[in-house]
Image (tube, rainbow, N blue to C red):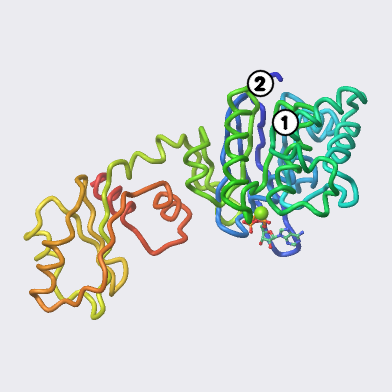
C-alpha cells in the first residue's frame, strides 16, 4: 500500500433529518491499530460503512491504501476485510464451506482456500466445529467465524465493528489475542468498540466520536496523561455533604475535593488514598457516609469527560486550573 492505509476527509452522512456523520477526518497509518470509540448512536457504524464501501458518503473523500474509493471501489475493497455488526455468512453452510465461499469471492483458488480455511478454523478454536452448520454455532463461535471469513484473503487492512460485544469472556479474549497477533504481523486494524479497557489495551491511537463528530484523536499514552497515577475515592453520602469543601481541603492538604452530585463526594490525589480518616472526619461532623470506593482513574474517565456523557467535570476543572 502506498501512503496512509486510510485517509478520509470531510465525511458526511444524513438519514432524513438525522445528521449521523458531520464532517469526519480520519488518517490511519499502515500497521496501526486504530480505535474508534463513542456512545450509542455516535455515528461509528455509519462511518465504518462508508469507509468499507457499504454506503456512499453525502460529502467527503475516502482513500484506502492510495486508492480513491469513489473511482475504484472494487480495488479498495480487495485490500480490506470487514467484520460488520451483522453476520454476512450462510446459516446452512458449514464453517469450512463458509470460509471457502468467502475466499472464492476474493478470487482465491480452490486449494489455497481449503488450506487457509483449515488453518483459520484451527487458529480460531473452531477445528472441531468445522463441518457443522453455521446456524448451529454459538454467538461467540459465529463471531469468530465471521472474523476468520474477513481475513481469508489476507487483507492488509481489517475493519471490525464491535467484534467482542455480546459474547463471553473466552471468545472475547481469543478475538483480542488474534487482533494483537494480526497487529504484530503488520495488518492495519480499524476497531470500533464500546469497551474502553479493550481499546486501552489494544490500540495505538484512538478517535473519540460523539454526535457525528470526532472530538479527539490521540495516542493512548497521551489520552491517559491527565489521569495517569491519579487516585480517586468516591464517597456516597445519604444526606448530602454538609461540611464545606474548604474545611475538607484545610484538613486534608494535598487532596482535591469535588461534589459531582449532591450525595457524592469525590476525592482525588496523586498518592494512594486512605478512606478511614476522611470517613471519620465526615461522620464526626454529622455527615452520613454510605459507602467509600477507591479506584485509579482510567481511560474511561477521559472518555466520559471528552464525549460529555457524564456529570464529572474534574478533568475540565483541572485543565482550567492549569491554564490559569
Ligand atoms: N439506516 C439508517 N436510517 C436512519 N437512521 C440511521 C440509519 N443508520 C444510522 N442511523 C442514525 O444515525 C445515527 C448514527 O448511527 P450509528 O449506527 O452510526 O451509530 P453507532 O455509533 O454505530 O451506535 P452504536 O454504538 O449503537 O452501534 C443514529 O442517530 C442512527 O439512528
Ligand atoms: Mg454501531
Mark 1, secondary structure of its residue: strand
The residue that mark 2 highlights is 3
Q: CA distance from mark 2 to mark 1?
A: 10 Å
Location of residue 186 (image quadrant): top right
Location of residue 150 (image quadrant): top right
Residue 274, above or below 112: below
- Residue 242 pos. (x, y %): 16, 76
Q: Are the residues flagged by discs 2 and 1 in contact, CB closer than 8 Å?
A: yes
Instruction: Please rate how many residues cluster around mark 1, counting C-alpha atoms within 10 Å: few if below 14, some from 14 to 19, many from 20.
Output: many
- Answer with mark 2 or mark 1, whichever residue precedes in sequence: 2
Q: Is residue 264 left or right of residue 62?
A: left
Q: Quadrant of the N terminus?
A: top right
| Nearer to the camera, 263 or 27 | 263
Ligand 2 shown in quarter: bottom right
Q: Residue at x 68, y 50 (%)?
A: 140
Q: Residue at x 71, y 26 (%)?
A: 156
Q: Residue at x 90, y 34 (%)?
A: 105
Q: Residue at x 80, y 27 (%)?
A: 116
Residue extending furthest toward the top: 2
Location of residue 323 (image quadrant): top left
The residue that mark 1 highlights is 63
| Nearer to the camera, 211 or 170 | 170
- Residue 62 pos. (x, y %): 72, 35
Residue 41, above or below 49: below
Amino acid at each position: 500500500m502506498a501512503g496512509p492505509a486510510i485517509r478520509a476527509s470531510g465525511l458526511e452522512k444524513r438519514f432524513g433529518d438525522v445528521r449521523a456523520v458531520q464532517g469526519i477526518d480520519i488518517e490511519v497509518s499502515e500497521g496501526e491499530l486504530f480505535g474508534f470509540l463513542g456512545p450509542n448512536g455516535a455515528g461509528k457504524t455509519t462511518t465504518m460503512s462508508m469507509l468499507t464501501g457499504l454506503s456512499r458518503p453525502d460529502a467527503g473523500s475516502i482513500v484506502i491504501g492510495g486508492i480513491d474509493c469513489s473511482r475504484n471501489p472494487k480495488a479498495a475493497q480487495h485490500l480490506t476485510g470487514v467484520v460488520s455488526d451483522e453476520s454476512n455468512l450462510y446459516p446452512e453452510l458449514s464453517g469450512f464451506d463458509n470460509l471457502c465461499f468467502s475466499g472464492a469471492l476474493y478470487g482465491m483458488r480452490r486449494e489455497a482456500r481449503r488450506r487457509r480455511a483449515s488453518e483459520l478454523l484451527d487458529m480460531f478454536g473452531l477445528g472441531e466445529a468445522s463441518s457443522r452448520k453455521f446456524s448451529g454455532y454459538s454467538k461467540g463461535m459465529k463471531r469468530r467465524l465471521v472474523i476468520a471469513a474477513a481475513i481469508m484473503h489476507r487483507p492488509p487492512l481489517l475493519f471490525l465493528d464491535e467484534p467482542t460485544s455480546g459474547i463471553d469472556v473466552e471468545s472475547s479474549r481469543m478475538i483480542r489475542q488474534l487482533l494483537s497477533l494480526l497487529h504484530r504481523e503488520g495488518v492495519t486494524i480499524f476497531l470500533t468498540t464500546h469497551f474502553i479497557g479493550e481499546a486501552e489495551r489494544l490500540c495505538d491511537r484512538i478517535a473519540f466520536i460523539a454526535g457525528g463528530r470526532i472530538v479527539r484523536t490521540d495516542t493512548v499514552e497521551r489520552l491517559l496523561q491527565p489521569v495517569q497515577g491519579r487516585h480517586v475515592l468516591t464517597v456516597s453520602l445519604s444526606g448530602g455533604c454538609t461540611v464545606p469543601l474548604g474545611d475538607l481541603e484545610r484538613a486534608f492538604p494535598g487532596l482535591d475535593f469535588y461534589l459531582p452530585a449532591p450525595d457524592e463526594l469525590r476525592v482525588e490525589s496523586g498518592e494512594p488514598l486512605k478512606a478511614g480518616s476522611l470517613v471519620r472526619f465526615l461522620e464526626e461532623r454529622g455527615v452520613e457516609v454510605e459507602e467509600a470506593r477507591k479506584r485509579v482513574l482510567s481511560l474511561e474517565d477521559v472518555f466520559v469527560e471528552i464525549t460529555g456523557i457524564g456529570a464529572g467535570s474534574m478533568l475540565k476543572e483541572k485543565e482550567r486550573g492549569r491554564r490559569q
